[in-house]
Amino acid sequence: MSRLSAANETLAREIISRYPRPKSALIPLLHLAQEQDGYVAADAMEQLAELVGVAPAEVLGTCTFYEMFKREPVGKYVLNICTNLSCQLNGGEELLHHAEQALGVRPGDVTDDGLFTVEDVECIAACTEAPCMQVNYRYEYRLTTSDFDELINDIRTGNRSDLPEHGTLGLVRQHIPADRLAGNESPEEAGTPSWFASRQPAPEDSGKA
Amino acid sequence: MVATNAYVPHAAGYVDNDGPKIVTSRFLHEDSYTLVRALATGGYDGLKDALRRSPAEVAGEVKNAVLLGRGGAGFPAGIKWGFMPPVWPRYLVVNGDESEPGTYKDRLLMERDPHQLIEGCVITCYALGLNQCFLYVRGEMALAQERIAQALNDAYAAGYVGKNILGTDVSIDVVLHWGAGAYIVGEETALIESLEGNPGRPRLKPPFFPAAKGLYLKPTIVNNVETLANLPWLMVNGADKFRSYGSEKSPGTRMLAISGHVNRPGVYEVEQGVVTFRDLFYGEQFCQGIRDGNALKAFVPGGGSAPWFFEDQLDLPIEASEVGSQGSMLGSGAIMVMDETTDIVKACLRLVRFYARESCGKCTPCREGTAWEEKVLQRISDGHGRPEDLDLLLEIGQSISPGDYPVASFISEDLDPVPFPPKQTTICPLGPSSVAPITSAVRRFRSEFEALIPKSELISATAPTVGPDAVEQLEVSK
Amino acid sequence: MTATESTEAATGVPFFLNGKSLTANKGELLIDACERNGVHIPRFCYHERMTPVGMCRMCLVEVDTGRGPALQPSCMLPVTPEMKVQTENEVTQRAQSGVLELFLINHPLDCPVCDKGGECPLQDNAYSYGPGESRFVEEKRHYEKPIPISDLVNLDRERCILCDRCTRFSKEVAGDPLIHFMGRGSETQVNTFPDHPFSSYFSGNTVQICPVGALTASPYRFKARPWDLTATESTAVIDGTGARIALQSSQDELVRVLGVDSEAINWGWLSDKERFGYESANSSSRLTEPLVKTGSGQTSDIGFAPIRWNNALARTAAALGANPERVGVIGGARLSVEAQYAWSKLLSKVALISNVDADLGDGIPADLALGLPRASIAETVAPGSVVVLMAGDPKEELPTLFLRLRHAAVEDGVSIVEITPRRTSLTKHAALSLHPRPGALGSVTEAMANGSFSGTVGGVEGSDLQAAAELLGSDRPVTVILGRANLAESSDFLRDAVQSILTIAPNAKFLPALRRGNLMGAFEMGLAPGFGMGGVPTEGGCSTEQILRAVVGGQIETLLLLGADPLSDFPDRALAAQAFDQVTNLIALDTFLSSSSTLADIVLPAAGFGEVDGSFLNIEGRLSPIQAKVTSKGQSRDDWLIAVGVAASLGADLGFSTLEELRIDLSANVASFSQVDWINLGRGDDGPLLDSTRDWSPEFGERKAVPAVDGYGLALVVDHKLWDLGTLVQNSATLAGLPEKAGLALSRSDFEKLATEEGERVTIETERASANLVVTIDDSCPRGTAHIPFRLPGFDVGELISVSSPVTTIRVAR
């Protein structure tokens, strides 16, 4: 239930500044809100609506379309177990059932200790390493049920500090120093790059749309 | 147990072979993703090369190379670029939203060699005369995002991207953008919608051909990650050298992910049109046979959306037009192999369920039809099928994809192939894709479905009849 | 242009429809071209007034453009030369029936209790194009049955077929994107953001365009079945736009109003006030019999007793006939043109009363409304033109006109130049937004005309003045929307501004922003001081303000109210109250007991909305019919018949005893009406635009001095909200609760000087009165101004306004 912190709001404005239209930043900003709180809070969505200049309902429309955005708190570690064909052929569904039993939850639910949410997900592009799983979007390959148990144990005993808590995606962010930025104009104002004309004969109708 | 070769964890899935390497040349270096390694191995030479030429010459080189798009549709990149009207601003959007079932290649290219991709982006921007590129990376790929973010930060600092690239007047930004989990965003118009901050629901073509009316309704080229990863090599080595690999219609190499029931699943860079499916599944350089020496039951040649192939198609080359005329597609280079032990009904249900879950909901036939298909298949799988359900499934398919659906030949039954692509009542191919596993599986393995359907006299006792219908829940005047 | 293109433009685009050779207009969508040629293609998402999205897939037809036949959505496909279209072949039929089957699998079978049942496109298309029976045996999708998404609209997500009409309307047409698709795939649903209801002024349109019963309107739910309804076309009389409507009744009660697609006026859209205001006509508070005041005359002791019509008419006649100079008549905008004519004739020809004003001092002077070159709505919004907004926020005052203006600015390249005391709903679409300080409108426009662009004038930057002057002085057509943006500011400044604008743009036309019903008709019929019928200037006559002053001064002792409520609507509350306190005879012709008519000696009950036949003259001067749909309540009578009755009591004959005779008389006596074809009025068209050219022009006279700025005070801006304490809103059960509470809004910088919190109460003071109001920050207020809306619950801002001051300045303290 929180708006972005001052630091995150600054970051949000930096992200917005990279796009020709502010609304284009909406998905990265929803990730930012989720990184802050572990889920996307309603207050944050209202703030994002202000930041990118749309109605809150439009932000919610985008937020609810994409699976990664959670609008309720989830486990600190979200376990995405793939059951699509390549993984199904190699035991993905059995792994999912094992995870459900081992943790005592159904897909989408949070364990009582708030640590884990299990999800039955679609193909996560590690098909040759089936069955596979992501923990907060970090991969585990060719996972046996005992591998799974060991991993859970490692997390519970604090041996997986390499895994950030749910919400954090890339630990590295793009940052374009002001003096390195080529430029960003609205689609209404932007025209042909100056270098283009000088490097080849301009097409007949060049110029703004 | 699956036989595995030793693979270095950082390159999980990639398997080297003796063929030419156009996009995976750095993959075996442990630090392949760093700027240091890139520069030590010819990184950004292609960009330097491009900047010495005019944009038109660069575009011409790509056109001459016949670089087919590697995202799924296989359209020549050079020709696609030529569709852009002389209108500015224009944008490049790079499709890194890899999520077609069975597909695993773009993630490797992004994680293992982000500089190669960035270089490809900048070359493309230069050729098209534009200065903003959006690199749309699938949300679930945290490592790819980190690697690209780091690579971009380094490349900006070193002057390969951004203002005055390599000291020239050329200025081009590459912006890393994250997705958030929606398969449909891999469709180019949906990708554009998503990049505008909207739900990723596809736009109708026409009038919204991205090359003319794309991002912000401005001319936009959407290219796949692997497609652009070819450009640095192409700039340095030229179109003629590029075309010396692969077949005439499909030059160069492709990255193929072969998964499922093979002894050595992996991602291989292979020459197009040269290698056959049989080579891939049984060859020593490749997958080394079906697991446990089992017989092949079926395989998906180009991602979950591709109609299935069988033993009869094993000797087809990895070549788009050959595969297309035989009733399927090479798609995104995702090959999934099913051996004789495979439960076909479950496999079919699983793929159909994927489309039902991933339908964006815009077009009625897909939104309602895929969900209905899933429910019927689930019921059959649970043992509550009715004899008419198989025809019903095909009929629902007709409402999403009318007419003869693409399907492989069935030589022993004397059935001819129906060539790709399918017709559609929808805006995009997602809905029609759900018909692929149904048509393929029901035509070939009808008896396996029928085996799950209770005998007709038992139906009334076992099958659920009409669910709790709304009639019982009529709203009442207050 | 190529040879083919020029041929197409001249002769249209040849195409083949089911084998028949036909012609489409250039750029015409296939679905429209087929419809025009008598072939209906079923559709759900397509709506002629919105951007096609091609997502329901119902309108798929087989099309061959030379590359082989393929199914295409006809709603997104412009016809191209030699296109071959099959709308009835097997492929098309199979596709359409397949789509319908899929629509129905999750649609509930509650048609028998659905408001839409019987007029439902899904039902109709299912019968015509559907498969007959469903093969769906699974469980249907379930949602909580209707959820209120606003005070007026309920959403049943089970019935929703996700056609994007309501969501598109709210974003694209209304600009209120409060509802949106949520979720994905078969779980997609329309919904609002939590705690942000769909409180759009235009929400009712979504109910009308919903192709199923997913959206229902609270006032109509379960009121009637479509087959019990009878309908007639009429005109919305709530504001001066005159939107075209269909009035529907069941068992002699109005139950629904629908928008009619009039190309000239409302494009099928209505505001919720126009749509749901009919509720007031059914109110139990309606006046049903003539009344006479009883009691001692003390306010606390006032009561009414019914009297017979003859008696009421005789008393009215006696009061009006005694001494015409000592009679004032206020109102008339609620009346039909015919009733206005009858009353005007009675007053001017029989009773010889000249102190008549239909404006309540809250609009613009009659000479400006009548005498400036008039623009039609179509001219105003014509692509590429310039619109100068010098009026109150059109969204609040003339909401359907607002939709046309918004569309013009967003889609058609119309440049809006706003010269208003504060930001309006059009600001974000405006090319320029100038906000002169109250009192500075004349000097700001004068600076524009004189080219004095240095520094700031009246709070407006010189660069903005220059940009505005350049836009107005360009060769693009200019229309000025002229209204009263601030009730706490004299309308004299408006006169000065008009003069200056005509200097910059001599060919500018004007669209009077008259928010009160048929005020244009009243002016045209001579219910205005200084004007006779047909806008002919006459001698003498007091305005409402002058009448009230004359009552206070003892020169006028009898007041006749023609459906007016000056005690609530006249901006200066103290003056109105004093006048009503002192008046000797007060006669009110009304449909309800208002603050004013409650004080009347005689109350004459008038037939109301939906109960009378007549006509309406909108702000552009377009005459359209008003039709009776139900019988009038109790003994209430048509307004014109009451005039005839009063005349008879005075021993006079107005010359007509039927509406037909009245119209003949009217056409004979008012030149602009001489050509009106009364019998066919509004049948199959939008009604005629009457000639509004005059042989006179408004006089501008001396320019008004700019009032001095009180550095310690804030200039008060008072304007209207759509939902207020007006009679219509308050007597419509569903609308009565919608007005928000009165509050004070300040710019951020003025607010910060108060060192208080938002939502806290502050004290405001003028020379006249003081009050306590909740304060909020409002970025639409320029620095130095304070905004309080008119006629809202909690505070009557009229108490602060003095019509003798050109502007009202308030002091605010914590």
Image (cartoon, coloured by chain):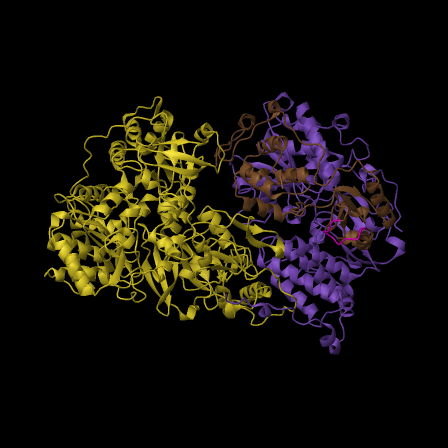
In front of the other: C283 or B217: C283
Residue C546 falls inside the magenta stretch: no
From what the image shows, is residue B100 above or below residue C215? above
Q: Colour of chain C?
A: yellow
Residue A109 in the magenta stretch? The answer is yes
Which residues are the magenta region?
A103-110
Q: How many marks?
A: 0
Q: Position of residue C193 (x, y in %)?
A: 55, 48
Closest to the observer: C264 or A117?
A: A117
Task: Please name the color used to draw chain A.
Answer: brown
Looking at the image, the residue that sits furthest to the bottom is B457
Nearest to the observer: residue A66 or residue B475: B475
Look at the picture and state if C216 lies above or below A125. below
According to the colouring, which chain is purple? Answer: B
Image position, residue C491 (x, y; %): 26, 37
**Any part of residue B156 in sight:** yes
Residue C556 position (above or below residue C735): above
Q: Is residue C794 left or right of residue A1?
A: left
Q: Residue furthest left?
A: C651
From the viewer's perspective, tell me whether residue C410 is left or right of residue B304: left
Based on the displayed image, in which of its 4 quarters is residue C69 positioned? Answer: bottom right
Q: Position of residue C764 (x, y in %)?
A: 38, 34
Q: Quadrant of the C terminus of chain C?
A: top left
